Image: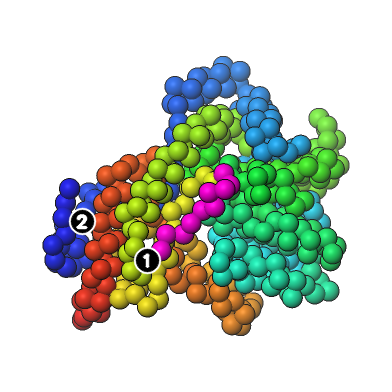
Amino acid sequence: MKKLAKLEDLAILGGRPWFEAPLHVGRPNVGDRARLFERFNRMLDERWLTNAGPFVRELEEKTAARLRVKHCVAACNATVALEIAVRALGMEGEVIVPAMTFVATAHALQWQAIRPVFCDVDPVTFNLDPAAVEKLIGPKTTGIVGVHLWGRPCDAEALADVARRHGLKLLFDAAHAFGCTYRGRPVGGFGDAEVFSFHATKVVNAFEGGLIATNDDALAAKIRLMKNFGFAGYDDVVYVGTNGKMSEASAAMGLTSLESLDTFVAVNERNYDRYRANLEGLPGLRVIEYDRREKNNFHYVIVEVDPGAGVSRDALQKALWAENIHVRRYFYPGCHRMEPYRTLDPDAAARLPVTEAVAARVLALPTGTAAGPDEVDGVSTILRFCMLNGRALASRLVRP
């Protein structure tokens, strides 16, 4: 294995990059290629490429069984799925949502002229703080959107209690949380509905795809109408809808990916445990923990850089990128600092101190089936060296 003896060995200071090719946070899991192409051949033979084909229906049935919910509705992607779920639930006016999330969560509301009211997160879980949510409820509030950040579930029961007492709709953005549980129950059956992402970089992928899970029969029927232009029959349009259908090719990939989910999770857990062992006791750096009493997909390895460490999170990111380690600041700088939200609500940051702090100090590390033990050890070696030589590295990086 390569070694780092002095600061000049770092690529950012003139050394050779540790990895020849970029190592990404989220390279897609592929699964059984032979099985995938078998499905593609069947799809092409049957010439059924979209419009609720057999693969889409099979994916909906198998995910519903796995999530233990009555209904799963597949969609072309999770953003459209969120938009459809929001509209089907009748949300309008203002909806409370964390700013510590991917911007699509907020956009799904703003796109429909609903104002996202950004709420601070819990300082321990980094998920939506139910007590803070309750303080933000006003006369225009119609709903709450919780986010299971990095696959670690929200306090779904506390949020459900708040929603019930105030007559609000409760939707969960579960983009990160397929295969995870909350108090022993699979994520998917909480709130009025939950939306999953099957984007290429997720633990289960359908190239691009989304999924809406719900136990509400009427809501599921409405969502099915809305994702297919409002068609209730061959020539019968009964509702304003859009084109949110998942293709058969995407469903074929989703099914293939679902069949390998346990393998993907095992690899993720192996990588996560190896990172934790490699980085244990490292001053100024903490690996975010998963609750081992629950099922986790371990799809994100997140480290938190202490603001008092010798090197900043952003300087650490630059040093790692120079080594072809493409770590990500998930989620920086927070939706409230992106447009149009920073213009619409320029004072939001003052109300979100925990969000501000978390967004400034976390990094997501490469994992998944594209990262083996050697890659994990290489990333860990760079991290340890940078943190242990943080002050010296920081002083070198600020020189003109």
Q: In this view of the protein, which residue sits in the foreground, 69 or 37?
A: 69
Closer to us: 344 or 277: 277
Q: Secondary structure under badge 1?
A: strand
Residue position marked by numbered label 1 in the rendering = 285
Quarter of the image for residue 143 reads bottom right
2 or 1: mark nearer the eye: 1
Vertical arrangement, residue 163 with respect to residue 206, above or below: below
Give the distance between the C-alpha atoms of the residues marked 2 and 1, in whole angstroms: 22 Å
- Left or right of 381? Residue 84 is right
Q: Main secondary structure of the magenta part?
A: loop
In the rendered image, residue 95, in percent from the top left (x then y), is placed at 73, 66
Q: Point out which mark residue 357 bears.
A: none
Q: Residue at x 45, y 31 (%)?
A: 31
Residue pictured at 57% horizontal, 63% vertical: 125
Highlighted range, magenta:
286-295
Question: Is residue 380 toward the left or the right of residue 35 in the image?
Answer: left
Can you see residue 307?
yes
Residue placed at 48% from the left, 56% from the top? 289
* Residue 294 highlighted magenta (yes or no): yes
Q: Residues within 10 Å of mark 1 (few under 14, many from 20)?
A: many
Q: Nearer the viewer, residue 21 or 148?
A: 148
Please tell me whether residue 84 belongs to the stretch shown in magenta. Answer: no
Are the residues tagged 2 and 1 within 8 Å (C-beta)? no
Quadrant of res 160 = bottom right
How many marks are shown on the rendered structure? 2
Which amino acid type is marked by label 2?
Pro
* Disc 2 secondary structure class: loop
Crowd band around label 2 with a 10 angstrom C-alpha radius: few (<14), some (14–19), many (20+): some
Residue that carries the numbered disc 2 in the rendered image: 17
Counting residues from the start of the chain, the first of labels 2 and 1 encountered is 2
